[in-house]
Amino acid sequence: MASDDHPWPAPLADAPVTAVVTVPGSKSLTNRALLLAAIADGPSTVTGALRARDTVLMGKALGSLGVRIDGLTDGDDAPIHVAPSTLTGPAHVDCGLAGTVMRFVPPVALADGDIRFDGDPRARVRPMGGVIEALEALGVEIDDDGRRTLPFTVKGSGAVRGGEVELDASASSQFVSALLLSAARFDDGVLIRHRGRPVPSMPHIDMSVELLREHGVTVDVDATDPTNATWRVAPGPLRALDRAVEPDLSNAAPFLAAAVVTGGSVTIPGWPTRTTQAGDA
């Protein structure tokens, strides 16, 4: 470990760096892909998925609600097979520290029964009020003792009314994506109105919208004014589809930088020609 007395000896390239580097799949895309596959209208296969604690927790969360997920803990190159089923409780969801689990899974309140959410001690200080209050406005009963953080229990009834909701998503773009990803399964879909400071990480909301459209969901967006943006999701089925997860482009940056600073050449296989990942920039 580096310190003032023992500095870390940074590696020095004595020649141009030339390499082909395969980077793992995008975590953001993997967890969105798993959730959408779990509520689609038929079985599907996800390839190129990232194997990490957050993605395993997402798979286990969905599995605890009755979704069959095979291959998640197999080798990195193994396909993941997802077979949707009627979502049922009671269930306990371990969120770990994964924001995508603690925020994306509660709106899947289409499960009939209590779903308890908790996570690591540090997860209990992460903001959840935007998601909890929005779900309550859409007709979902949630018991959080007024904390607006983990732990809390979603009282699933097998359906979500949906409709129009206003929220402040300036704390996290995940508040918006959380509602978008499940909204097509709500009885009335959803109309989300953001009111507040500009939403951070808008490309991640664009990612959610793009994936939904690929599943055949109608999504209308007006984000011209980032302090007064709206998203509308029409109710309807999510078409099942097989998905290949893109490599995580942000993880590719250090390797590309090594080529730039040494006058070398680094190739990242599988770089998409079109993507919503912010790392593409």
Image (cartoon, rainbow, N blue to C red):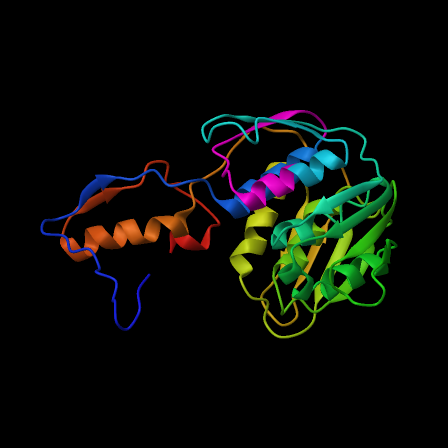
Please tell me which residue is depicted at 81% across the width and 31% down the height of the picture.
86
Q: What quarter of the picture does the N terminus occupy? A: bottom left
Q: Nearer the viewer, residue 87 or 37?
A: 87
Find the residue positioned furthest to the front: 5
Find the residue positioned furthest to the left: 14
Q: Position of residue 39 (x, y in %)?
A: 72, 35
Residue 131 shown left or right of residue 199 in the figure? right
- Please tell me in which quadrant of the rendered image residue 73 appears: top right
Q: Position of residue 192 (x, y in %)?
A: 73, 59
Residue 113 shown left or right of residue 231 in the figure? right
Q: Position of residue 196 (x, y in %)?
A: 66, 74
Rendered view: 250 above or below 83:
below
Q: Nearer the viewer, residue 143 or 109?
A: 143
**Does the image show residue 213?**
no
Q: Position of residue 32 (x, y in %)?
A: 60, 43
Residue 204 shown left or right of residue 174 in the figure? left
Rendered view: 209 above or below 223:
above
Q: What quarter of the picture does the C terminus occupy? A: bottom left
Please tell me which residue is depicted at 64% across the width and 56% down the height of the picture.
221
* Count of marks placed on residues: 0
Please tell me which residue is depicted at 25% across the width and 62% down the height of the picture.
8
Whether residue 186 appears in magenta in the rendering, the answer is no
**Does the image show residue 207?**
yes
The residue segment tinted magenta is 41-59
Please tell me which residue is depicted at 9% across the width and 49% down the height of the picture.
15
